[in-house]
Structure formats: C-alpha cells, structure tokens
Image (cartoon, rainbow, N blue to C red):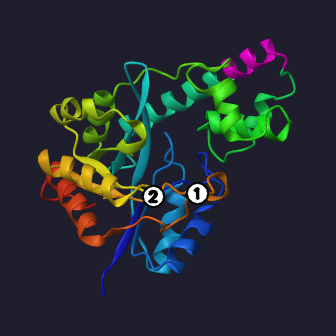
Amino acid sequence: MTRYADLHIHTFYSDGTDSPEEVVRQAKAKRLSCIAISDHDTLDAIEPILPVAADAGIEVLTGIELSTEHEGKDVHILGYCFDHHNEGFIARIREFQQARLERIKDILDKLKGHGIDNITLEEIQAMTKSDSLGRPHVAKKLIEKGWVRDNREAFERYLAEDGLAYVAKFRQTPREAIELLHAAGGVAVMAHPMVTKKDQIIPELVEAGLDGLEVFYPNFSQSVIMYYKTIAEKYQLLMTGGSDAHGKAKTNTSIGKKKIPYELVEKIKQAAQKRQGPQAGV
C-alpha cells in the first residue's frame, strides 16, 4: 500500500488555528503516514506534537517555514529534518520572533495614524500560542472590529506591500536561511514557487545550496505542478509538497488535500543524513 505525507501544515503556534492534537487527528483520518509542522519562524509545535503523533503511528519530520526577502519581495524557505535542539538555530529563531513583535507594534502604530485605534498588541499576542506574530493576526482583528470585510481587503488596503500600514519585515535573505538550516543539519526548500512567482531566482538559490522545491501544492493545475517538477528535475532538486493547511484560517485547503508519496520523504531524509554525517539520525 502506498504511503503518503503532508509536509506543509501550520498550527496555532503561528498563524493556523489547530492544536497539535487536532493536526494529528486529521492526519490520521486522512491516513497519512508522515507529517511536518512548518510553522512560521517558530519551533514551538515540534515537542508537543511528537508524543501525540507517535501514539497515532504517524511519523513527524522537524519542519519550519522561514521568512526571507529578496529584492523587497517575500520568499519563504521551508526547512526539514534539522536538529531542533541546535542552540544557534534556536537563538536565531528568537531573533526572528522579536523582530516580528516589533513589526506588529509598528503596524499598529500606522493603523492608529489612519484612525484604527481599537486593536491592541495584547489582543494580537493572545491569538497565537507562541511569539510568532504576523500580518494574518492583524488582518483577523481588522475583520472582527469591522474595519474590513475580509482577509483580502485587509491586505489590499492596509497590510500588503503597498498598503497603508505596511511595515517591512526583518531582513533575512534566502541564502542566509539556507545556510542557517544547513548549519542545523537540515535541508532547505523553496516554498510554493507558484505563489511566490520569483522563478528567476531559482538558479541563484541553487547556487546558494537550495536542496529542494515545493512542487506539489493545493489548488493549482496539474500543468503548473508539472512545470515545477521539470524545474526540480533540471536542477536535481528534491521535490516536496503539502497542503499548507492553516485550519479555519485558510478555508481553501485542509490537511491531506495535497500529499506526496513517502518515497519523496525518504529522499529528504537521505539528503539530511548526508549533511549530518554517517552517525546521524533524522
């Protein structure tokens, strides 16, 4: 029987709504053999999910989605099979979270300048179980308080790069994220290139040590998937994929909506083992 994995799942430790327990329950219902929690710039979900997944007979790869910027545009780098106890990695993640906090403060200040003065930092912090605060949390509050109708309007009017309250995030390049993941023994994958629409930088990222491309992603046609599969094959990159599920925060996808055969997981693990050395486990 073919085994499947979903390697792109978010929890309430970043901008998702599901607990680790809820993630495992849904993964088991979809008969997934392996999952990875890829929360934004936080490791907080990894330890809570490990025993729950073990009880359910589901393998967990360490995962994260790192925020980076290239020429003023967001480029996300997924990391897998790294040592989540690596002190240098943990320290860097704490820096990211502090930068996220400062960014939210600045966004709220800008919103106040446009008359939106009834959203507090404490309200935003209460929306996540970690310190990984982001624009989706602010968008949700803008909707709840009646300032916008939906998430799209929140971003178009206030939070997108040309929005009234936009604040640039901390400056980390894709190359720096790749190096960070490699230093912790992990592999680095460019997230959802069909969403990022920065294909021109793929050769540059390959030169920087990029290990893989997220080829399999929900709500895109088979022709788009085949296009990125061809690119991955051209540069001899690992192919990964997943649902990018965020629970109730993202209604156009769900855990297991996009999954990959386990043989691709094995290739990811093998690549990480080569980096970590012959005595390392994943």
Name the image quarter holding the N terminus: bottom left
Residue depicted at x 55% and y 22%: 161
Q: Amino acid at mark 2?
A: Pro
Q: Quadrant of residue 78?
A: top left
Q: Amino acid at mark 1?
A: Asn
Q: Nearer the viewer, residue 5 or 165?
A: 165
Q: Is residue 139 visible?
A: yes
Which residue is label 2 attached to? 218
Which residue is label 1 attached to? 252
Residue 258 coordinates in the image, percent (x, y): 43, 64
265 lies left or right of 122: left
The part of the chain drawn in magenta is 105-115
Query: Tag on residue 32?
Result: none
190 lies left or right of 138: left
Is residue 114 covered in magenta?
yes
**Tag 2–tag 1 contact (CB < 8 Å):** yes
Name the image quarter holding the C terminus: bottom left
